[in-house]
Amino acid sequence: MDILIPILTLGSLGLIFGIGLAVASKKLSVEVDPRLEAIHGLLPGANCGACGGAGCFGFAESLLSGKASIDACRVAEEKTKEQIAKLLGKKLEKKIKRTAVLRCNGGSKVKDKFIYQGIKDCVDANLVLGGQKECSFGCLGFGTCVAVCPFGAIKMSEEGLPIVDKNKCRACNKCVLVCPKKLFSLIPVTHNVYVACNSHELGKDTKAVCPVGCIACKLCEKACKFDAIHVIDNLAVIDYNKCTSCGECVKVCPMKTIISRPGLVSKTGS
Amino acid sequence: MSIAQFLTIFISAVFIYNVILSRFLGLCSFVAISKETRPALAMSLAVMFVTTMSSIITWFIYRFLLIPFNITYLRTISFILVIATFVQFVEMVIKKISPPLYRFFGIYLPLITVNCAVFGVAVLNIDMFFINGEAIRASFYYSVFQGLCVGLGYTLAMLLMSGIRERLDFCNVPKAVKDFPLAFIIASIMSLSFLGFNGFRF
Protein backbone atom coordinates (compact mmCIF):
# COMPACT_ATOMS: atom_id res chain seq x y z
CA MET A 1 0.00 0.00 0.00
CA ASP A 2 2.92 2.33 0.70
CA ILE A 3 3.74 2.47 -2.97
CA LEU A 4 0.31 3.90 -3.80
CA ILE A 5 0.89 7.30 -2.21
CA PRO A 6 3.96 8.23 -4.26
CA ILE A 7 2.33 6.91 -7.41
CA LEU A 8 -0.84 8.89 -6.83
CA THR A 9 1.06 12.02 -5.81
CA LEU A 10 3.37 12.04 -8.82
CA GLY A 11 0.61 10.91 -11.15
CA SER A 12 -1.72 13.68 -10.11
CA LEU A 13 1.06 16.24 -10.27
CA GLY A 14 1.89 15.13 -13.80
CA LEU A 15 -1.77 15.22 -14.74
CA ILE A 16 -2.26 18.74 -13.42
CA PHE A 17 0.82 20.08 -15.17
CA GLY A 18 -0.07 18.21 -18.33
CA ILE A 19 -3.53 19.72 -18.45
CA GLY A 20 -2.07 23.15 -17.74
CA LEU A 21 0.36 22.81 -20.61
CA ALA A 22 -2.32 21.52 -22.95
CA VAL A 23 -4.47 24.55 -22.23
CA ALA A 24 -1.48 26.87 -22.64
CA SER A 25 -0.48 25.33 -25.95
CA LYS A 26 -4.01 25.84 -27.27
CA LYS A 27 -4.04 29.45 -26.14
CA LEU A 28 -0.54 30.26 -27.31
CA SER A 29 -0.44 28.23 -30.49
CA VAL A 30 1.35 29.77 -33.43
CA GLU A 31 0.05 29.00 -36.88
CA VAL A 32 2.85 27.99 -39.17
CA ASP A 33 2.28 28.04 -42.89
CA PRO A 34 2.50 24.38 -44.00
CA ARG A 35 4.20 25.54 -47.19
CA LEU A 36 7.20 26.59 -45.12
CA GLU A 37 8.04 23.02 -44.22
CA ALA A 38 7.40 21.88 -47.78
CA ILE A 39 9.71 24.50 -49.26
CA HIS A 40 12.39 23.84 -46.70
CA GLY A 41 12.16 20.17 -47.57
CA LEU A 42 12.61 20.87 -51.26
CA LEU A 43 15.57 23.20 -50.90
CA PRO A 44 18.99 21.56 -51.16
CA GLY A 45 19.74 21.89 -47.46
CA ALA A 46 23.38 22.73 -48.06
CA ASN A 47 22.98 25.95 -46.03
CA CYS A 48 25.63 27.50 -48.26
CA GLY A 49 24.30 31.02 -47.83
CA ALA A 50 24.83 31.90 -51.47
CA CYS A 51 21.27 33.26 -51.63
CA GLY A 52 22.08 35.78 -48.93
CA GLY A 53 19.69 34.18 -46.44
CA ALA A 54 20.68 32.61 -43.16
CA GLY A 55 20.70 29.02 -44.37
CA CYS A 56 17.98 27.21 -46.26
CA PHE A 57 15.33 27.73 -43.58
CA GLY A 58 15.87 31.47 -43.57
CA PHE A 59 15.66 31.47 -47.34
CA ALA A 60 12.42 29.49 -47.25
CA GLU A 61 10.95 32.09 -44.90
CA SER A 62 11.94 35.02 -47.06
CA LEU A 63 10.57 33.13 -50.07
CA LEU A 64 7.22 32.80 -48.36
CA SER A 65 7.11 36.41 -47.32
CA GLY A 66 7.98 37.40 -50.88
CA LYS A 67 11.23 39.08 -49.95
CA ALA A 68 13.36 36.75 -52.03
CA SER A 69 13.06 35.17 -55.42
CA ILE A 70 13.66 31.47 -55.97
CA ASP A 71 16.28 32.43 -58.56
CA ALA A 72 18.51 33.55 -55.71
CA CYS A 73 19.20 29.91 -54.88
CA ARG A 74 22.10 28.92 -57.06
CA VAL A 75 22.19 25.37 -55.88
CA ALA A 76 18.75 23.88 -56.42
CA GLU A 77 17.99 21.89 -59.56
CA GLU A 78 15.68 23.43 -62.12
CA LYS A 79 13.06 20.79 -61.31
CA THR A 80 12.91 21.60 -57.61
CA LYS A 81 12.87 25.28 -58.38
CA GLU A 82 9.81 24.70 -60.53
CA GLN A 83 8.15 22.74 -57.72
CA ILE A 84 8.83 25.52 -55.25
CA ALA A 85 7.57 28.14 -57.67
CA LYS A 86 4.40 26.06 -58.02
CA LEU A 87 3.97 25.96 -54.24
CA LEU A 88 4.32 29.71 -54.12
CA GLY A 89 1.96 30.14 -57.05
CA LYS A 90 4.57 31.94 -59.10
CA LYS A 91 6.16 31.32 -62.45
CA LEU A 92 9.79 30.47 -62.70
CA GLU A 93 11.90 32.52 -65.05
CA LYS A 94 14.33 30.29 -66.82
CA LYS A 95 17.91 31.02 -66.05
CA ILE A 96 20.87 29.35 -67.64
CA LYS A 97 22.87 27.26 -65.25
CA ARG A 98 26.43 28.30 -64.77
CA THR A 99 29.47 26.37 -63.65
CA ALA A 100 32.88 27.39 -62.43
CA VAL A 101 36.04 27.27 -64.55
CA LEU A 102 39.63 27.87 -63.52
CA ARG A 103 41.27 30.61 -65.53
CA CYS A 104 44.75 29.14 -65.24
CA ASN A 105 46.43 26.19 -66.91
CA GLY A 106 49.87 26.56 -65.42
CA GLY A 107 50.08 24.17 -62.50
CA SER A 108 53.28 22.15 -62.51
CA LYS A 109 54.26 23.70 -65.85
CA VAL A 110 55.09 26.90 -63.98
CA LYS A 111 58.20 26.71 -61.81
CA ASP A 112 58.42 27.84 -58.21
CA LYS A 113 60.44 30.95 -57.50
CA PHE A 114 61.27 29.88 -53.95
CA ILE A 115 60.74 26.91 -51.68
CA TYR A 116 57.57 27.50 -49.72
CA GLN A 117 57.43 25.57 -46.46
CA GLY A 118 54.51 27.28 -44.79
CA ILE A 119 50.91 26.20 -44.27
CA LYS A 120 49.60 24.23 -47.24
CA ASP A 121 46.82 26.64 -48.03
CA CYS A 122 46.49 29.03 -50.95
CA VAL A 123 45.26 31.95 -48.85
CA ASP A 124 48.20 31.60 -46.47
CA ALA A 125 50.75 30.98 -49.23
CA ASN A 126 49.53 34.06 -51.06
CA LEU A 127 50.54 36.20 -48.08
CA VAL A 128 54.19 35.30 -48.67
CA LEU A 129 55.30 37.45 -51.61
CA GLY A 130 52.12 36.58 -53.47
CA GLY A 131 52.75 32.86 -53.52
CA GLN A 132 55.61 30.64 -54.56
CA LYS A 133 54.87 30.44 -58.31
CA GLU A 134 56.92 32.31 -60.88
CA CYS A 135 53.68 33.63 -62.36
CA SER A 136 52.16 35.99 -59.83
CA PHE A 137 48.69 35.54 -61.34
CA GLY A 138 48.60 31.75 -61.47
CA CYS A 139 47.14 28.95 -59.43
CA LEU A 140 49.16 28.10 -56.31
CA GLY A 141 47.86 24.56 -56.26
CA PHE A 142 47.26 23.95 -52.55
CA GLY A 143 43.63 23.12 -53.15
CA THR A 144 41.86 25.57 -50.87
CA CYS A 145 39.04 25.55 -53.42
CA VAL A 146 38.79 21.76 -53.11
CA ALA A 147 38.30 22.10 -49.37
CA VAL A 148 35.75 24.87 -49.63
CA CYS A 149 33.53 23.27 -52.29
CA PRO A 150 30.40 22.01 -50.46
CA PHE A 151 29.51 19.65 -53.32
CA GLY A 152 32.83 17.89 -53.85
CA ALA A 153 32.92 19.18 -57.41
CA ILE A 154 36.56 20.23 -57.42
CA LYS A 155 39.47 17.79 -57.51
CA MET A 156 43.20 18.37 -57.86
CA SER A 157 44.74 16.96 -61.02
CA GLU A 158 48.19 15.41 -61.19
CA GLU A 159 49.43 18.69 -62.60
CA GLY A 160 48.47 20.48 -59.41
CA LEU A 161 45.47 22.21 -60.89
CA PRO A 162 41.92 22.05 -59.59
CA ILE A 163 39.46 20.46 -62.01
CA VAL A 164 35.80 21.38 -61.76
CA ASP A 165 33.30 18.59 -62.35
CA LYS A 166 30.72 20.23 -64.58
CA ASN A 167 27.96 17.93 -63.38
CA LYS A 168 28.56 18.42 -59.69
CA CYS A 169 29.21 22.17 -59.77
CA ARG A 170 26.21 24.19 -58.60
CA ALA A 171 27.72 27.63 -59.08
CA CYS A 172 27.52 28.47 -55.40
CA ASN A 173 30.35 30.97 -55.84
CA LYS A 174 32.36 29.71 -52.86
CA CYS A 175 35.49 28.89 -54.84
CA VAL A 176 35.27 32.22 -56.63
CA LEU A 177 35.36 34.01 -53.32
CA VAL A 178 38.00 31.92 -51.59
CA CYS A 179 40.64 31.84 -54.34
CA PRO A 180 43.30 34.44 -53.41
CA LYS A 181 44.21 34.81 -57.07
CA LYS A 182 40.57 35.24 -58.15
CA LEU A 183 40.99 32.52 -60.74
CA PHE A 184 37.53 31.01 -60.81
CA SER A 185 34.72 32.45 -62.82
CA LEU A 186 31.23 31.17 -63.44
CA ILE A 187 30.37 30.74 -67.09
CA PRO A 188 27.09 29.52 -68.61
CA VAL A 189 26.97 25.77 -69.31
CA THR A 190 25.92 26.58 -72.85
CA HIS A 191 29.36 27.99 -73.51
CA ASN A 192 32.41 25.79 -73.72
CA VAL A 193 35.24 28.12 -74.65
CA TYR A 194 37.16 30.02 -72.01
CA VAL A 195 40.54 31.63 -71.57
CA ALA A 196 42.62 29.58 -69.14
CA CYS A 197 44.90 32.39 -68.09
CA ASN A 198 44.66 35.36 -65.79
CA SER A 199 48.05 36.96 -66.39
CA HIS A 200 48.13 40.65 -67.17
CA GLU A 201 51.89 40.60 -67.68
CA LEU A 202 53.38 41.60 -71.03
CA GLY A 203 53.44 38.78 -73.56
CA LYS A 204 57.15 38.04 -73.27
CA ASP A 205 57.10 38.14 -69.49
CA THR A 206 54.25 35.66 -69.42
CA LYS A 207 56.00 33.44 -71.92
CA ALA A 208 59.14 33.44 -69.81
CA VAL A 209 57.40 31.79 -66.85
CA CYS A 210 54.52 29.80 -68.36
CA PRO A 211 54.30 27.69 -71.51
CA VAL A 212 50.52 28.03 -71.73
CA GLY A 213 49.90 31.63 -70.68
CA CYS A 214 48.21 34.30 -72.78
CA ILE A 215 50.85 36.35 -74.63
CA ALA A 216 48.37 38.90 -75.93
CA CYS A 217 49.13 38.14 -79.59
CA LYS A 218 45.60 39.10 -80.64
CA LEU A 219 45.31 36.20 -83.11
CA CYS A 220 42.07 35.19 -81.40
CA GLU A 221 40.71 38.69 -81.84
CA LYS A 222 41.32 38.45 -85.57
CA ALA A 223 39.96 34.94 -85.89
CA CYS A 224 36.68 35.68 -84.09
CA LYS A 225 33.81 36.32 -86.48
CA PHE A 226 31.48 37.59 -83.79
CA ASP A 227 33.65 40.28 -82.18
CA ALA A 228 33.36 38.27 -78.98
CA ILE A 229 36.99 38.09 -77.84
CA HIS A 230 39.26 41.01 -77.10
CA VAL A 231 42.70 41.44 -75.61
CA ILE A 232 42.35 43.80 -72.68
CA ASP A 233 45.36 44.60 -70.51
CA ASN A 234 47.45 41.87 -72.15
CA LEU A 235 44.81 39.22 -71.60
CA ALA A 236 42.19 37.76 -73.90
CA VAL A 237 38.67 38.20 -72.53
CA ILE A 238 35.57 36.52 -73.94
CA ASP A 239 32.24 38.33 -74.05
CA TYR A 240 29.74 35.53 -73.42
CA ASN A 241 26.88 37.59 -74.75
CA LYS A 242 28.44 37.33 -78.19
CA CYS A 243 30.40 34.09 -78.04
CA THR A 244 28.90 31.17 -79.94
CA SER A 245 31.45 28.56 -78.88
CA CYS A 246 32.46 28.12 -82.53
CA GLY A 247 36.00 27.27 -81.46
CA GLU A 248 37.88 29.40 -84.03
CA CYS A 249 39.93 31.11 -81.32
CA VAL A 250 40.80 27.74 -79.78
CA LYS A 251 42.25 26.67 -83.11
CA VAL A 252 44.39 29.74 -83.70
CA CYS A 253 45.73 30.25 -80.17
CA PRO A 254 49.49 29.56 -80.43
CA MET A 255 49.89 28.98 -76.69
CA LYS A 256 46.83 26.75 -76.31
CA THR A 257 45.59 29.19 -73.70
CA ILE A 258 42.03 29.25 -74.94
CA ILE A 259 40.34 25.99 -74.08
CA SER A 260 37.20 24.26 -75.14
CA ARG A 261 35.66 22.65 -72.08
CA PRO A 262 34.79 19.05 -72.98
CA GLY A 263 38.47 18.31 -73.47
CA LEU A 264 39.15 19.80 -70.09
CA VAL A 265 42.32 21.29 -68.68
CA SER A 266 44.72 18.36 -68.35
CA LYS A 267 44.60 17.19 -72.00
CA THR A 268 45.51 20.45 -73.68
CA GLY A 269 48.80 20.96 -71.89
CA SER A 270 51.08 18.67 -73.84
CA MET B 1 11.34 37.90 9.01
CA SER B 2 13.34 41.08 8.80
CA ILE B 3 14.89 43.20 6.13
CA ALA B 4 18.34 42.08 7.26
CA GLN B 5 17.46 38.48 6.43
CA PHE B 6 16.33 39.42 2.92
CA LEU B 7 19.43 41.54 2.42
CA THR B 8 21.60 38.60 3.43
CA ILE B 9 19.82 36.34 0.99
CA PHE B 10 20.14 38.95 -1.74
CA ILE B 11 23.85 39.54 -1.28
CA SER B 12 24.72 35.90 -0.85
CA ALA B 13 22.66 34.74 -3.87
CA VAL B 14 23.72 37.50 -6.23
CA PHE B 15 27.35 38.03 -5.26
CA ILE B 16 28.90 35.66 -2.76
CA TYR B 17 27.36 32.45 -4.03
CA ASN B 18 26.63 33.68 -7.54
CA VAL B 19 24.97 30.74 -9.21
CA ILE B 20 27.26 30.74 -12.23
CA LEU B 21 30.51 32.23 -11.06
CA SER B 22 30.74 30.71 -7.59
CA ARG B 23 28.48 27.68 -7.63
CA PHE B 24 29.30 26.81 -11.27
CA LEU B 25 25.72 25.87 -12.06
CA GLY B 26 24.05 26.44 -15.42
CA LEU B 27 27.23 26.94 -17.37
CA CYS B 28 26.13 25.67 -20.77
CA SER B 29 23.70 28.48 -21.48
CA PHE B 30 26.13 30.92 -19.84
CA VAL B 31 28.75 30.18 -22.48
CA ALA B 32 26.40 29.58 -25.39
CA ILE B 33 24.02 32.55 -25.27
CA SER B 34 26.35 35.24 -23.99
CA LYS B 35 27.60 36.46 -27.35
CA GLU B 36 25.25 39.41 -27.54
CA THR B 37 23.58 41.40 -24.82
CA ARG B 38 19.98 41.29 -26.00
CA PRO B 39 19.56 37.51 -26.23
CA ALA B 40 21.60 37.17 -23.04
CA LEU B 41 19.16 39.45 -21.24
CA ALA B 42 16.18 37.60 -22.68
CA MET B 43 17.64 34.28 -21.60
CA SER B 44 18.29 35.67 -18.13
CA LEU B 45 14.72 36.87 -17.84
CA ALA B 46 13.48 33.44 -18.89
CA VAL B 47 15.70 31.80 -16.27
CA MET B 48 14.65 34.31 -13.64
CA PHE B 49 11.01 33.62 -14.35
CA VAL B 50 11.53 29.88 -14.16
CA THR B 51 13.59 30.01 -10.94
CA THR B 52 11.05 32.25 -9.19
CA MET B 53 8.00 30.33 -10.29
CA SER B 54 9.57 26.97 -9.60
CA SER B 55 10.63 28.18 -6.15
CA ILE B 56 6.99 28.97 -5.37
CA ILE B 57 5.57 25.73 -6.68
CA THR B 58 8.30 23.47 -5.33
CA TRP B 59 7.90 24.97 -1.88
CA PHE B 60 4.21 24.15 -1.89
CA ILE B 61 4.81 20.68 -3.23
CA TYR B 62 7.48 19.95 -0.67
CA ARG B 63 5.58 21.43 2.27
CA PHE B 64 2.13 20.13 1.56
CA LEU B 65 2.71 16.96 -0.44
CA LEU B 66 6.10 15.43 0.13
CA ILE B 67 6.49 16.06 3.87
CA PRO B 68 2.99 15.02 5.00
CA PHE B 69 3.10 11.81 2.96
CA ASN B 70 6.69 11.21 4.02
CA ILE B 71 7.93 10.85 0.47
CA THR B 72 10.63 13.49 0.46
CA TYR B 73 12.84 11.13 -1.54
CA LEU B 74 10.68 12.03 -4.53
CA ARG B 75 11.77 15.65 -4.50
CA THR B 76 14.15 15.38 -7.45
CA ILE B 77 11.62 13.98 -9.88
CA SER B 78 8.76 16.15 -8.72
CA PHE B 79 10.87 19.30 -8.92
CA ILE B 80 12.02 18.42 -12.40
CA LEU B 81 8.38 17.95 -13.31
CA VAL B 82 7.61 21.48 -12.14
CA ILE B 83 10.62 22.98 -13.89
CA ALA B 84 9.94 21.16 -17.14
CA THR B 85 6.39 22.46 -17.13
CA PHE B 86 7.47 26.03 -16.66
CA VAL B 87 10.15 25.78 -19.31
CA GLN B 88 7.60 24.42 -21.78
CA PHE B 89 5.37 27.33 -20.87
CA VAL B 90 8.13 29.89 -21.37
CA GLU B 91 9.01 28.27 -24.67
CA MET B 92 5.44 28.65 -25.90
CA VAL B 93 5.31 32.27 -24.80
CA ILE B 94 8.57 33.14 -26.52
CA LYS B 95 7.56 31.30 -29.68
CA LYS B 96 4.39 33.36 -29.67
CA ILE B 97 5.83 36.80 -29.01
CA SER B 98 9.27 36.66 -30.62
CA PRO B 99 10.07 34.00 -33.24
CA PRO B 100 13.56 35.40 -34.00
CA LEU B 101 14.46 35.14 -30.33
CA TYR B 102 13.02 31.63 -30.28
CA ARG B 103 15.26 30.64 -33.16
CA PHE B 104 18.25 32.29 -31.55
CA PHE B 105 17.82 30.30 -28.34
CA GLY B 106 17.62 27.10 -30.30
CA ILE B 107 18.24 24.09 -28.13
CA TYR B 108 19.21 26.13 -25.05
CA LEU B 109 15.68 27.17 -24.22
CA PRO B 110 14.36 23.64 -23.70
CA LEU B 111 17.64 22.95 -21.99
CA ILE B 112 16.65 25.26 -19.12
CA THR B 113 14.74 22.17 -18.05
CA VAL B 114 17.98 20.48 -17.17
CA ASN B 115 19.75 23.72 -16.36
CA CYS B 116 21.32 22.86 -13.03
CA ALA B 117 20.93 26.44 -11.86
CA VAL B 118 17.14 26.12 -11.83
CA PHE B 119 17.08 22.77 -10.14
CA GLY B 120 19.87 23.95 -7.83
CA VAL B 121 17.71 26.76 -6.49
CA ALA B 122 14.81 24.45 -5.79
CA VAL B 123 16.99 22.03 -3.86
CA LEU B 124 18.86 24.83 -2.13
CA ASN B 125 15.61 26.34 -0.88
CA ILE B 126 14.66 23.03 0.67
CA ASP B 127 18.08 22.54 2.23
CA MET B 128 18.25 26.04 3.66
CA PHE B 129 14.71 26.79 4.75
CA PHE B 130 13.55 23.42 6.03
CA ILE B 131 15.10 22.06 9.22
CA ASN B 132 14.36 18.46 10.16
CA GLY B 133 11.40 18.35 7.83
CA GLU B 134 9.87 21.48 9.32
CA ALA B 135 9.59 24.77 7.49
CA ILE B 136 11.32 27.56 9.38
CA ARG B 137 9.54 30.83 10.00
CA ALA B 138 8.81 32.78 6.79
CA SER B 139 10.50 30.06 4.83
CA PHE B 140 8.12 30.54 1.90
CA TYR B 141 9.05 34.19 1.47
CA TYR B 142 12.72 33.35 1.80
CA SER B 143 12.40 30.66 -0.86
CA VAL B 144 10.67 32.87 -3.38
CA PHE B 145 13.08 35.71 -2.72
CA GLN B 146 16.04 33.41 -3.09
CA GLY B 147 14.65 32.08 -6.37
CA LEU B 148 14.39 35.63 -7.64
CA CYS B 149 17.87 36.54 -6.38
CA VAL B 150 19.52 33.54 -7.98
CA GLY B 151 17.85 34.60 -11.22
CA LEU B 152 19.27 38.09 -10.65
CA GLY B 153 22.72 36.62 -10.06
CA TYR B 154 22.39 34.69 -13.30
CA THR B 155 21.37 37.89 -15.08
CA LEU B 156 24.33 39.75 -13.61
CA ALA B 157 26.80 37.11 -14.79
CA MET B 158 25.19 36.91 -18.23
CA LEU B 159 25.23 40.68 -18.72
CA LEU B 160 28.84 41.00 -17.61
CA MET B 161 29.88 38.16 -19.85
CA SER B 162 27.95 39.32 -22.91
CA GLY B 163 29.21 42.88 -22.46
CA ILE B 164 32.79 41.69 -22.38
CA ARG B 165 32.32 39.34 -25.32
CA GLU B 166 30.63 42.02 -27.41
CA ARG B 167 33.62 44.29 -26.95
CA LEU B 168 36.05 41.45 -27.58
CA ASP B 169 34.53 41.05 -31.03
CA PHE B 170 36.47 44.13 -32.04
CA CYS B 171 39.74 42.88 -30.63
CA ASN B 172 42.36 41.15 -32.62
CA VAL B 173 42.75 37.86 -30.79
CA PRO B 174 44.72 34.82 -31.98
CA LYS B 175 42.60 32.54 -34.13
CA ALA B 176 43.23 29.59 -31.84
CA VAL B 177 41.48 31.14 -28.84
CA LYS B 178 38.77 33.03 -30.71
CA ASP B 179 35.18 32.54 -29.50
CA PHE B 180 34.72 29.68 -27.05
CA PRO B 181 38.27 29.24 -25.70
CA LEU B 182 38.31 32.97 -25.01
CA ALA B 183 34.90 32.73 -23.34
CA PHE B 184 36.23 30.05 -21.02
CA ILE B 185 39.23 32.18 -20.12
CA ILE B 186 37.02 35.18 -19.40
CA ALA B 187 34.64 33.05 -17.37
CA SER B 188 37.44 31.75 -15.21
CA ILE B 189 38.86 35.23 -14.58
CA MET B 190 35.38 36.51 -13.71
CA SER B 191 34.87 33.56 -11.42
CA LEU B 192 38.16 34.27 -9.65
CA SER B 193 37.16 37.86 -9.09
CA PHE B 194 33.77 36.78 -7.72
CA LEU B 195 35.57 34.50 -5.30
CA GLY B 196 36.79 37.78 -3.79
CA PHE B 197 33.30 38.21 -2.27
CA ASN B 198 33.82 34.89 -0.58
CA GLY B 199 36.94 36.03 1.22
CA PHE B 200 39.38 33.61 -0.39
CA ARG B 201 39.33 30.84 2.15
CA PHE B 202 42.04 28.33 1.34
Image: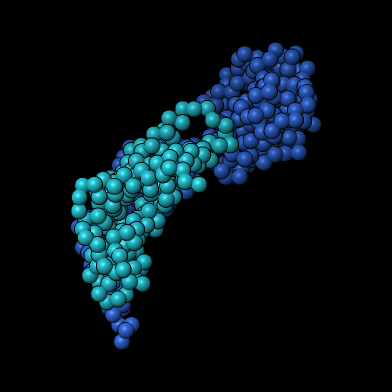
Chain colours: A blue, B cyan
Q: Residue furthest bottom?
A: A1
Q: Residue at x 75, y 28 (%)?
A: A116
Direction from residue A216 to residue A227 in the image, left or right: left
Residue placed at 76% from the left, 18% from the top? A207
In-image side of B4 versus A92 (left or right): left
Residue at the image point whose x is 63% and y is 25% from the top:
A181
- On screen, residue A15 versus residue A208, left or right, reads left
Q: How many marks are shown on the rendered structure?
A: 0
Which of the image's four quarters has the C terminus of chain A? top right
* Residue at the spot 61% in from the left edge and 43% down from the top edge: A153
* Residue A240 visible to the viewer: yes
Q: Whole-percent x and y of residue B107?
A: 40, 52
Above or below B61: residue B201: above
Q: Position of residue A236 (x, y in %)?
A: 63, 19
Judge by depth and name the residue closer to the eye, A223 or A139.
Answer: A139
- Could you say which is closer to the camera, residue A206 or residue B69? B69
Q: Is residue B73 above or below residue B167?
A: below
Which of A125 and A225 lies nearest the eye of the viewer?
A: A125
Image coords of residue A3 (percent x, y):
33, 82
Pick the residue in front: B89 or A46: B89
**Measured along the vertical axis of the image, is residue A147 above or below residue B55?**
above
The picture quadrant where one finds residue A201 is top right
Q: Quadrant of the N terminus of chain A?
A: bottom left
Spot occupied by residue B22 in the image (x, y as percentages of width and height):
42, 47
Residue A93 appears in view: no
